[in-house]
Image (tube, rainbow, N blue to C red):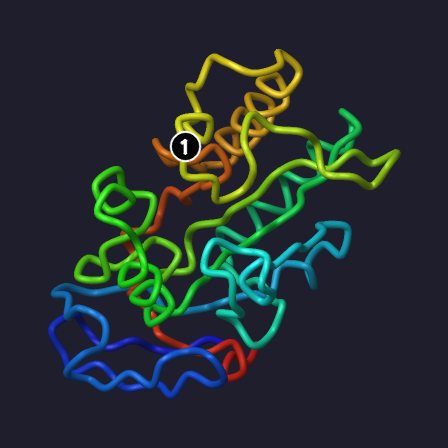
Amino acid sequence: MKSTLKPRGSTLGCWILLGTVLLTSCRTGPPRESGTFRDTDLVEFVRLDPTIQLDIRYATTNNFMHRRMYTQPRAFLQRPAAEALVRVNQSLRAKGYGLLVFDAYRPWSVTKLFWDAATAEQRKIEFVANPRKGSRHNRGCAVDVTLFDLQTGRAVTMPSDYDEFSERAFPNYTGGPTESRVARDLLRASMEAEGFTVYPSEWWHFDYRDWRQYQILNIAFELIRE
C-alpha cells in the first residue's frame, strides 16, 4: 500500500476496524498533527524474508489483555524499517539465530484499548503508550522482537517474558542468568546496527530511526493492500 498523505492538521479519515478492534470516529480518533509526512508504505516483511518467524500474540489470547486484539496474525512495517529488519535477520544467521516477531504496526484504536485497560502504575512507567500522543507502533516504525535458535527453532530465553510488566523487562536489567542477558544484548546490538533504538522499559521493543516522519495510522490489517 502506498498513498499520499495529507499534511498534519488536515482532517483525518476514519477507518473502520473489524472484529475486536474499536469503531473509531474522527472526533475520538488519533490526535491531529501538524506538518508533513512521508507516504505510507506498509510492508508485510515476511514477504521480503520468509525466514523471519511470527508469534503475533495480539491475534491470540496469549497476551496481557487475555483476548484477541487483532483479527489476523500479520505484521507490517514502513518499507525502510521492514528492509532494515530483514538486514538484521540476515546478519544474525551467521551467529545461529533468527528473528521472532511478536508485533509491529498497531492500529491506534488498539493502543487506546491498551491504555484504557492499564493500571496507573503501568501508565506511569510507560509500559503502554498514551493514545493522546500515539505510539510508534501506530506509525509503522516499531517492532517487538526476540531471537530464536536456528537449530532448535525455539525462542531464546531472555531476562523476562514478552510484555512482562517488571524490572526484568528493562534493557539494562542486570539480574537473571548471564546467558539471557548475552542474548538480549546481541539482539540489541544487531538492531542498533541497522538504525533501531531500544525502548527504555522493554528489551523487545525497537523504534526505527525515521519514526517521526510517519503519520499515526488507524488502518485495520484487512484494509492494507501492498
Closer to the camera, 122 or 50? 122
Question: Compared with residue 58, is residue 99 higher up or lower down, i.e. above or below?
Answer: above
User: What residue does disc 1 label?
Assistant: 166
From the top left corner, tell me how far across and down residue 23 is, in percent: 33, 86
- Residue 7 located left or right of residue 100: left
Specify the quadrant that holds the C terminus.
bottom right
Q: Above or below — where is 60 with respect to 128? A: below
Q: How many marks?
A: 1
- Residue at image point 34% right, 70% down: 217
Q: Secondary structure at mark 1?
A: loop
Nearer the observer, 58 or 3: 58
Residue type pointed to by label 1: Ser
Q: Is residue 122 left or right of residue 124?
A: right
User: What residue lies at 22% left-to-right and 77% top-to-bottom?
Assistant: 29
Across and down, in percent, residue 57 comes to 58, 58
Q: Is residue 110 above or below residue 191?
A: below
User: Within the image, what quadrant is residue 106 found in?
Assistant: bottom left
Image coordinates of residue 191 in percent, x first then y, are 53, 34
Q: Residue at x 29, y 75 (%)?
A: 5
Please give the name of the residue rendered at 35% of the width and 48% of the height, measured from the top-left corner.
210
Q: Residue 127: x percent and y percent?
A: 34, 44
